[in-house]
Amino acid sequence: AIENARKSVAQFAHARPEHIVFTASGSESNALALRGTISWKPGDVLVMSAIEHPSLFALASDLSSLSVVVRIIPVEPSGKVSLPSLEASIDGHVRMVSVMHANNETGIVQPIEDVCRLVSERTATLGTPRPLIHVDACQSAPWGMLARTSMCDFVSFNSTKLHGPLGAGVLVARAAVPHPLVRGGGQEWGVRGGSENVSGILGLGAALEELEHNDPRGE
C-alpha cells in the first residue's frame, strides 16, 4: 500500500518512485535536504532567499554556528527573488541554493525555472560544480505547480497543505542523501529510518486522488 502511494506521489511530483522519501512534515523534509545531503565544512556557503519558512532560517542558524556562510538573497518590490543578487552570490564555495516556491504569507510564486537556469549557467561560466538546489514547495504543491520544480535536486512538500492528514511529508530527492538524520532499519531507501506512518502516507495518497477531481484554482 505504501509503494502504491509512493507511485501516486511520484506522478504528482513529476519524479520517479525511487526519488520519493516519506517524512513526518515539510519542516523535516527541509531539514533532511539541508543537513542530510552535505557534510558542511567551515567556509562552505548556503544561499537562500529572505522569505523562507522559519524552519529554513532555523537550519541556517545551526549551519552558521558551524562556520558555514549563509548568504541571504533579497526580494524585489514585486516579492520575487532578485535574480541579479542571486547571480552575484554564486561562487565556487556555494554548496546549496534554497528558494521557496510560493510564499506562505504573500502567495508570490518564485520563478524557480529561472533560478535553476541561472545557477547552472553561472557555475558553468565560473567552471565550478553546480550547487544543489532545494525548493520548499509546501504552498505551491496543491496548485499543480510541481512540474516547474523538475530541474531541482530536492523538493519539500507536506500532506496538510493538500488537505491530507497531519504527520506526513515528502522530500523529492533526485540527488543522494548520504547523511540521514535518523538511522533505522533501512526504511525509505535508508534515507529516513523508523517505522513509516502508514495511515498518514495512505491519507496523503487519498488526498492526491481527491485533488485530481478538483479545479486546481480552488473553484
Image: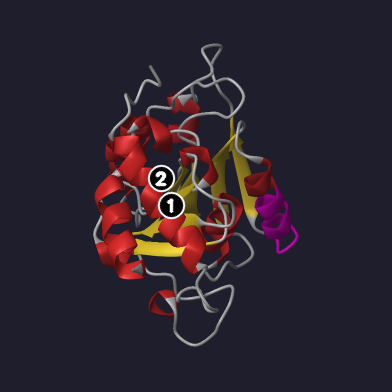
Classed neighbour count for the residue bearing mark 1: other residues with Cα under 10 Å, few (<14), some (14–19), many (≥20) = many
Classed neighbour count for the residue bearing mark 2: other residues with Cα under 10 Å, few (<14), some (14–19), many (≥20) = some
| Image position of 131 (left or right of 56) | left
Label 1: which residue? 204
Secondary structure that dominates the magenta span: helix
Q: Is residue 205 magenta?
A: no
Quadrant of the image occupied by residue 194? bottom right
Q: Give the CA separation, mark 2 to mark 1.
A: 5 Å
Label 2: which residue? 207
Q: Is residue 73 positioned above or below 156 on the image?
A: above
Q: Which residues are magenta?
A: 58-67
Looking at the rendered structure, the kind of residue marked 1 is Leu
Q: Position of residue 167 (x, y in %)?
A: 58, 57
- Tell me, yes or no, if residue 120 can be seen here: yes
> Going 27% across and 39% down the picture, which residue do you hit?
147
**Tag 2 secondary structure:** helix
**Tag 1 secondary structure:** helix
Query: Contact, CB < 8 Å: mark 2 with mark 1?
Result: yes
> Going 36% across and 62% down the picture, which residue do you hit?
20
| Image position of 130 (left or right of 197) | left
